[in-house]
Structure formats: structure tokens, C-alpha cells
Image (cartoon, grey):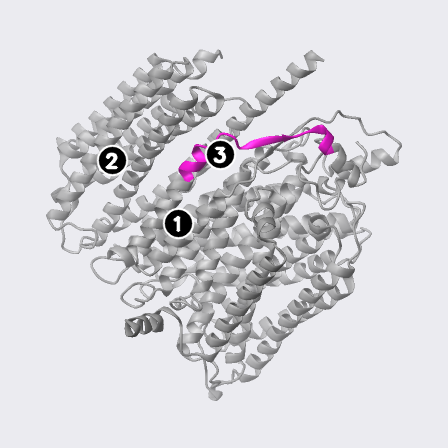
Amino acid sequence: MLESIKEFASTFFVTGDPLIYGADVSIALTSLAILFVLTYYKKWGWLWREWLTTVDHKKIGIMYLIASLLMLFRGGVDALLMRAQLALPGVEFLHAEHYNEIFTTHGTIMIFFMAMPMMFALFNIVVPLQIGARDVAYPFLNAVSFWLFMMGAMLFNISFVIGGSPNAGWLSYPPLSEMSHNPGPGQNFYIWGIQISGIGSLATGINFLVTILKMRAPGMKLMKMPLFSWSVLSSSIMIIFAFPILTVTLALLFIDRYFGAHFFTMTQGGNPMMYVNLIWMWGHPEVYILVIPAFGVFSEIVATFSKKRIFGYKSMVFSMMIISVMSFFTWVHHFFTMGAGADVNAFFAVSTMAIGIPTGVKIFNWLFTMFRGRIQMKTPMLWTIAFVPCFVIGGATGVMLAVAPADYQYHNSYFLIAHFHQVIIGGVVFGYLAGIYYWWPKMFGFSLNEKLGKWAFWFWNIGFYVCFMPQYALGFMGMTRRVYTYGWDLGWAPLNIISSIGALLMGIGFIFQVWQISYSIKHGERDKTGDPWNARTLEWSIPSPAPLYNFAIVPEVKGQDAWWIMKEEMKNGEEPKKAELEPIHMPKNSGIPFIMSVFWFIAGFGFTFTWTWMGVVGLIGVGLCLFARSFQYDTDYYIPVDEVKRTEASLGRVV
Amino acid sequence: MEHAVTHHAHDHHDHHEEHEQLKVLGFWIFLVTDCILFATLFATYVVLRTHTDGGPIGKEIFEVPGFVAETFILLTSSFTSGLATLAMHKGNVKGLIGWLIVTAALGLGFIGLEISEFANMVQEGATISRSAFLSAFFTLVGTHGLHVSVGLLWMIGLMVQLGRYGITTVTKRKITTISLYWHFLDVVWIFLFTVVYLMGVM
Amino acid sequence: MSQHEAHGSVKAYVIGFLLSIVLTIIPLLLVLNHMLSKGWLVFAIMLMAVLQFIIQLVFFMHIREGEGPKYNVMALILGIVIVFTIVAGSMWIMSFNG
């Protein structure tokens, strides 16, 4: 009996590496500490009522933000481990297998569990406030989305200490990810972690599409809507068309692994290249799903801190909508070297270059907005200005990669690595960080310390160039991606050590940000006006943080930059129209999203270890939760006028 | 004063109506995403349909009477679910539940036929792990069957709710969405019938 | 449009049903009796499928109804474009391997 338990534990838990044991201990200690604090301060009820069951978009946004920052930390540690291994030739820090796992989890976590939730954090926190709505279209579904993401992320992350991490790269190409080459649970963790969170992402796409189309304040025509909301609309359109493809692709891989099918195997007619084709049909739009909201963030920030209306509003809208459709027609440029033939490669090379045009248009619009503006160099604006040259270089190297014949030279080299980090860090991460700095006062009611923010900014930026510029050259020198070590004779050592120093600088930048947040929680300037930046859009017209119902009175929108217009009117002495308060219709909290997601987690865990009974139990639980929800008819309530009046008065507003 | 109160009640009613409309729109968009899901499965099937690895081909395993029967049963159930919504708009609860029962029974018959079709194939050695073609076939047709099965459970749940609450704004919206879902599954089947079965036996 | 018409009538459902039956039987006969050459046959049966799809949309799913901007129709049209891209694109790209 004891023997069989021992044997089970030795395969169930990851063993053998001191780094892992260290992580085991720290995870156990952190969990105990959290349990202790919650119990000691009697916070379990509070946690359940205020957070686990909430359907409030603002709280859901904050939970997304916290999760994404934690994942940024984990993905960042992965990156630093890799750069430590590659700093010099022949380093014996990580062995080959461990290195494979780390580059796989780095990529997967950064895209699926860092960038996506950080984006959804901004969606949730900003969009309803910006369009003058009291919540999203489907608040319950919104909570489901969040908890599915959270459980998917947890499932993926426990592979670190239980069962073993996936090691077939961030997109898990077969045949390496098939049973024949990879029989352990690692790849199943990958499939189920992403599958569960992916369903949540799809639901978020539907939710925000309908929210933006149907829930705008009266008078806000589509062409008067702020650009960040437009960018969310564009991103949501891509999500609803791209994510089903990912779901199917991963499902097919799982059917191969679980039922012994032959979609992507090397035998019995399977075709691994079909997987590559399908995954990039999702993968390319995904890149734009992430970057378009960042463009939206920049558009808001540039206008606010230049004290001007955005230049070329219409061309911004059209370019975003064009990108959201065109992004579905460029996917082959990720595998030009597969051999699909000159006609196919030529078509996709041209479409790839063409999609650069609307992106270029936007760059000019931002520059012209700044031109002759009174620019204030606050941290959000710093990140925005740093983004422009960074993204231009990333775009230019992208066009180089789009030249199909030349791509045979760059493919899978460090040139490619440098390129996509430049557009993803320079575009997506800079954008989201700028957005977090910008909307932070709205979320929490205080600003982040500017001085520490500037230190963080310079460490990140200098670190970025020091890290990735040498990698372009390394690519040309023949260094391919995913190598875990190299010899002195290749001449790659000097550039690699520089690159590793750059990674370290970015890590220091992150530490500064953690410091900045913890410092500002205590000492940050409280935002009593609700409009700390003298901004232009509706979210700044209400107190910070926004009350539960967002708007006591739904605002009347008279044009683009609605809040700016209202402020101008007030300056001219016009009295804002008095409107009667009415009871506010709100959704009730529900525990079902959380419980259902726990069942998804159980199902995913069971299928990961091919414990079918457990998988089936999980799925039955999911079904029962859906039924329970379908039979709930008492799902909303009204906040009475008195309570709204009291809340507004306590926030210093008279209605 | 009294006027104000009725005005309010009216507002609340409008609010609900609007809310239910919003859910129908969301469901339409969900159906579009489901189209993409099936498109991906179709693409996989079309690319892999010739990859039989010396195993059985479509002509050998598809039985014409079986899939023709499935087609007409599903088509009829799509029609009867339409009649159910008609009864609903006339406020006829009994008619509504009656037509839903007919629809569900037809759906059940469809699933039964499909299971026996699959069982026969497996007995002849045409299993999911025999070839890429068969993997794609079982997954594509099976995913549709899974959708129909989920629809059946959902429909049963709604019949219970109808019995409990009658025809209200909320149950009306629920019946509207499930009937959209049911028609959508018939539409997907038209393409399965054409691309998988007809082209398979051609 | 009156309330009654907005949700279709028995007549409309019956017409839709009959048309669907006809559009199912024709391709079945074409295929089983080996009429037409292969290319034309594929074209003909696909055309019938698309027609039946449109009939279901109009007669059963009432796609033409509703007030305000028809976001469901827009989503469907864009969806069909993407569906076509996925299927035709895959066939084209993977054809080198056939």
C-alpha cells in the first residue's frame, strides 16, 4: 500500500530539480499564509460576497488585473531563467528538457494568461464607464468568463509542480505534441488550460460586442464613440471569429491523444501540417486581438495629454475595422517555409504587407495629434511616446519577414524572436501598462507615484532595447530559436550576454512597478475630483472609484469627447439639465460562475491525467450548474432612489 | 401619484423586454461562432477525406437509407419546432409543449439512428483510429450529434419551466433561442448531408 | 408589420418545409442516378444546399425581422465570409500535400 502511494507520488509530483522543490515550498507557504490571513481576520464571508460571487464589471476587471500581474511575474521569471541559461556558451544551469518546458510555459503564459487577462481587465474597467452604461450586456456571463479564465490559468500553472509542464512550444505543434512523442500529462495540461480559458474569452468577445452595440448612452452614435471602445469592438469581432478555430484545433489534438484518432499524427493518413494551418488561422487574428485595444489606449492617452481632439478620428475607426477583417487573410506568413507553393506564399506575402498600411495610418494620426499640442509628460504619455518608435521598428522588421523568399532565411531564427517581442512588448505591453497607469485612479481612487513610475519606465525601455536589438543580429548570425546552449566557437557570446543584461534591466523595471504600487497604496494622491488628468471621455465624469451603478443619471451625449463638451458647457455657465433619479436596475450576485468553473477545473484535471471518471464527474457538474442557472428566475433587483441619493452624497456629488 | 406608479411599472416591463431582446441578439452571435466551429471541422474533413490509409472509404460505409432517414427526421423536427413557436405567439401553452414534445421525440429518433449508424461502422472495423478520414468523419458528425443531444436536454428543461411559469417574457425568449438553435442544427445538417454523405457516395 | 406577421404564419412554415424537402430530394436523385459530370454535380448539390440554407434563414429563423440595425445579419454575413475563408483557404493551402 505504502509502496504504491510512493510510486504514484513520484510520478504525480514533479521531482528531481532543486528549483522545483524551492517552488513547492514557496507555493505551500504562500497558500498557508493566505488561508491563515483569511481565517484570522474572518474574511471568508467577505471574499465570497464581495469577490467570488460578484457580477460587477469593475470588480471583475480588478480581478483580471491582479491575475495578469501575477502571470506577468511568472512569465517574467521564466524569461530571466532562459536568459541566464543563454548568457554565456555552455552554461549548465538548466538542462535541455527543463529549458524546453520553460520556453513553452513562458510563451503560453505571456499570451494566454498575461496579455489576454490584462486586455480583459481594461475592457471590463473602462468600456461600460466610457459608453455611459451601468454594466455589460450579460453580467452573469462576464463572471463566468473570468472564472473560466482563472481556472484555466490555475490548471496550466499547477503543471509546474504536478505531473510535469508541457514542452512542445507555445503553440504545441504536432507530431511533437502527440502521444507518440509526448505521452505524459504535460500536453494535456496545455490543451485543457487553454481550452477552459478560451471558452471564457469567446464569451467575453460576445459580451463586449453586444455591450458596445446596444448599451451606449443616449446620443452616443457609433461615430461619436471614444476610440478605446471602438478598439474593443474591433477586437471583440476578431475574438468571436477566431476563438472557435482555436477551440476546434485543440479539441482535435486532444481527440488524437485521448481516443487515438489520426488528425495530426505521422501515421494512418494524419497530417501535422493541417494543425499548423488551423492554429495560425486563430493565431494571426490573435495578434491583432491583443494589439488593437492597445492602439485604443494610445488614442485616448494622446488626446488627453496633448489637450487636443484626436487627429483623424474617422480614419482611426476605418483602419481598425479594416484590420479586424484583414487579419483573417494573412495567416500563412507564419509558415511560408512549409512548402505550400509560390502562389499561396505570394498571396499571403502581399496581404501581410497590405495590413501594414492601416497600421501606418494610425501612427501618423497619433503624431499629428501631438503636433502643436500642449503635451504633458505623465507616465501614461511616456509609455505612449516610447511605443511609437518601438512599434515602427517592429513593423519594419515585420515587413522584412513578410517577404516570403527572404523569410526562408529569417524563419525560426532570433531575428523572428526579436521581431515579435518588439511588437508584442512595444505594442501590447507598453499599451496595456500605459492604460493601467491612465485608468488606475478610476479603478482605485488614487494615482500611482510618478517618480517611481519614471524609474520603472526607463528601466523597462532601456532594458528592452538592450535585450532585443542584439537578437536581430544574432538571428542573422545563425542563432535559431529554442536552442538551450551553444559553443564559444560560434561568436554569439558577446551579444547574448548583452541581451541577458537587458532582460535583467526589464526585471528591475518590474520591481520598480511593484514598489510603485505598494508605495502608492499608502501614499498615493487620492483622486477626489474623479477627473485627475482633465480628460475627455465619460468615465471621468463620475467619482473615482465609480459607485456600484456607475451613473446615477444616464448621461446625454452631445458629441465626440462627451465629457469635454460637458466641461466646456459648465465653463460657459450653462447649468447641466436636472434629471429625476429613478430606481436602478441591477443584476444579483451569483455563486454559479465560480462553482461551475471549479467543475471545469475538475473535468480538465481528470482528462489531463486520463482519469475519465473524474472528467465525467466534472462535466456533469458543469451541466448541473447550467441547469440550476436556467431555473433561476429571480436574477435582478432595483436600487431604490434613496440609496442612490445617499451613495452620491457620500461621494460628494449632489443630484 | 397613481399615474407615476403605473408609469414606473410600465418602465420596468419595457426594461425586461429590452433585456430579453438583448439576449436573443447575443444568442445569434453565439450561433455565428458555432458556424465558425463547424467550418473548422468541415475544413479538416475536406482536407483529410482522401487520407484513408487503405481503410474504408465513404462509399463503403455510408448507407443511403440511413442518412436519408436522418435528414428527413431532422428537417421535420425543424418544422415542428417552428410550429411550437407559432403556438407560443398565439399564447397556446398546450400547443407549444405538445409541439416541443414532437420535436424532442424526432430529435431523439435522429440521435438513435446516428448511434446505430456509428455502431455498425465500428463493428465493420471503421473506427475513429483507423484513418485520418474516419477521425475527421466521426468528429464532424459526432459534434453535430452532441449539439443535438445538448439541445434535447435543454428542451426538456424548458418544458418543465413552461409547465411551471407558463408563457412569460422570459420563457418566450428561451423558446425563441432554442428554436433558433434547432433550426441552426438543421442548417448544419444540410451541409453534412451534402458534403459528407452525398459527396461520399458519389 | 403587425404582431402576427412578425412571427411568421403556418403558411410560411409549410412553404419553407416543402421547399426544403424538394431541395433535399433533387440532389439526392442527382447523386444516386449519377446524372451530370462530377464537377457540375458538386456545383449543383452545393447550390441546392445553399438555397436550402437561405430558405431556413428566411422562413424558419425570420432573419428579415426585427427593428433597428440588424447586427445579427451583419455578424452572419461576416461569419459566412470567414467560413468560406477557413474552408477554401485550407483546401488551397493544403492542396500541395494532396
- Mark 2 belongs to which amino acid? Thr
In the image: residue A541, left or right of residue A168: right
Residue A630 lies in quadrant: top left
Q: Which of B47 and B146 is in front in this view?
A: B146
Task: Identify the residue position indicated by label 1 in the image.
Answer: A247
Q: Nearer the viewer, mark 2 or mark 1?
A: 1
* Residue C84 x, y percent position in the rendering: 38, 41
Is residue B194 in the magenta section? no
Q: Give the range drawn in magenta.
A: A626-644
Find out whether residue A630 is within the magenta segment: yes
Q: What element carries label 3?
A: helix
Look at mark 3 in the image and give the residue it sits on: B26
Question: Which image quadrant for residue B97?
Answer: top left
Q: What residue is rendered at 58% in x and 49% in y?
A: A45
Residue identified by numbered label 2: B194
Residue placed most toward the observer, A222 or B86: B86
Residue B138, above or below C30: below
Q: Are marks 3 and 2 in contact (CB under 8 Å)?
A: no
